[in-house]
Amino acid sequence: MSFLQAIVLGIVQGATEFIPVSSSGHLVLIPWLLGWKSPGLTFDTMLHWGTLLAVVGYFWRDLASLIGAALHGLVTRRPFATVEARLAWLLVLATVPAALAGVTLEHQFEALFNAPIFVAVFLLVTGLLLWTSERLSSRLRDLASVNAPDALTLGIAQALAITPGISRSGSTMAAGLLRGLDRPASARFSFLMMVPIVFGAGLLQLKDLAETGPTAGQPALMAVGFLAAAVTGYACIAFLLGYLRRHSLRIFALWCWGLGLFSLIVALLRR
């Protein structure tokens, strides 16, 4: 792998982890389209830790407030006394479906990461989710109105993203819109609920890495990929939260459809 490839893959991971177009799908399709070799588990792990740094770095005040409110609620035996405490526990609830899916189904879906055609099809599905949610949503509710059914619905949507090509942020934002949340609330809750999932996935990857041993490669390449993912991820969070105050998710649906169709055409031509 060259430094250019490391930078490109880091940027792709950092951008598409938060922009609702499927990071897993792009990390499968872009190397495949460009004829690059798979970067391997070691590099992939570093990219995920880079995006985790981005979201924690951007939302550290929110996370500190939520954790503090939850702990204070436990001490005072009033766990839902404040909006922050209630949101903290709703985020825990939202994490459960994806955590269960990751632990029980991860290996069953691994083969799909080597199947670009399936990834392209699931990108088309992501586009459909984004477009449909925009058409059907009332977008009347803010973050403070999130309740347990909302959290569980978004959690189930997040679990669907174990499939490469199904965008984690896209499926959860779409679920939030379909529950009547406005776009900024859907995006903010989606980004906050990803923290424990990405952290847990990173730990599982480290566990697999410890069992199989690291792949050969220079530490400098992994550092470059990590930094590219972190910096790009931070910038994309800031961009998307501002963008969604005034614009819809339809442009991202069009991107998913465009890349999905292009990849299917390439796959057919390569046969």
Image (tube, rainbow, N blue to C red):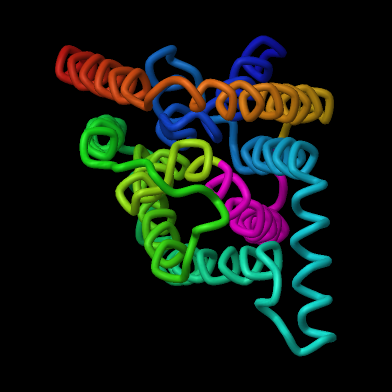
Q: Which residue sits at x=61%, y=15%? A: 8
Q: Does the magenta stretch include residue 86?
A: no
Classify residue 24 as left or right of residue 144.
left
Q: Is residue 211 magenta?
A: yes
**Quarter location, residue 26:** top left
Q: In which quarter of the image is the C terminus?
A: top left
Classify residue 11 as left or right of residue 3.
left
* Whether residue 239 is situated above or below residue 174 in the rendered picture: above
Where does residue 98 sit, x and y in percent of width and height?
47, 63
**Would you say residue 245 is visible in this rendering?**
yes
Q: Which residue sits at x=70%, y=76%? A: 81
How many numbered discs? Answer: 0
Classify residue 140 as left or right of residue 23.
left
Nearest the camera: 39 or 137?
Answer: 137
* Whether residue 97 is situated above or below residue 201 in the rendered picture: below
Q: Which residue sits at x=78%, y=65%? A: 67
Classify residue 151 as left or right of residue 83.
left
Q: Main secondary structure of the magenta part?
A: helix
Nearest the camera: 235 or 148?
Answer: 148
Nearest the camera: 64 or 107?
Answer: 64
**Would you say residue 212 is visible in this rendering?**
no
Q: In which quarter of the image is the N terminus?
A: top right
**Quarter location, residue 25:** top left
Q: Which residue sits at x=84%, y=85%? A: 75
* Whether residue 229 is situated above or below residue 197 in the rendered picture: above
Where does residue 224 sit, x and y in percent of width and height?
77, 22
Where does residue 205 sit, x and y in percent of width and height?
64, 54
Where does residue 61 sit, x and y in percent of width and height?
82, 47
* Whether residue 84 is situated above or below residue 138 in the rendered picture: below
- Residues rendered magenta in the picture: 188-215
**Quarter location, residue 257:** top left
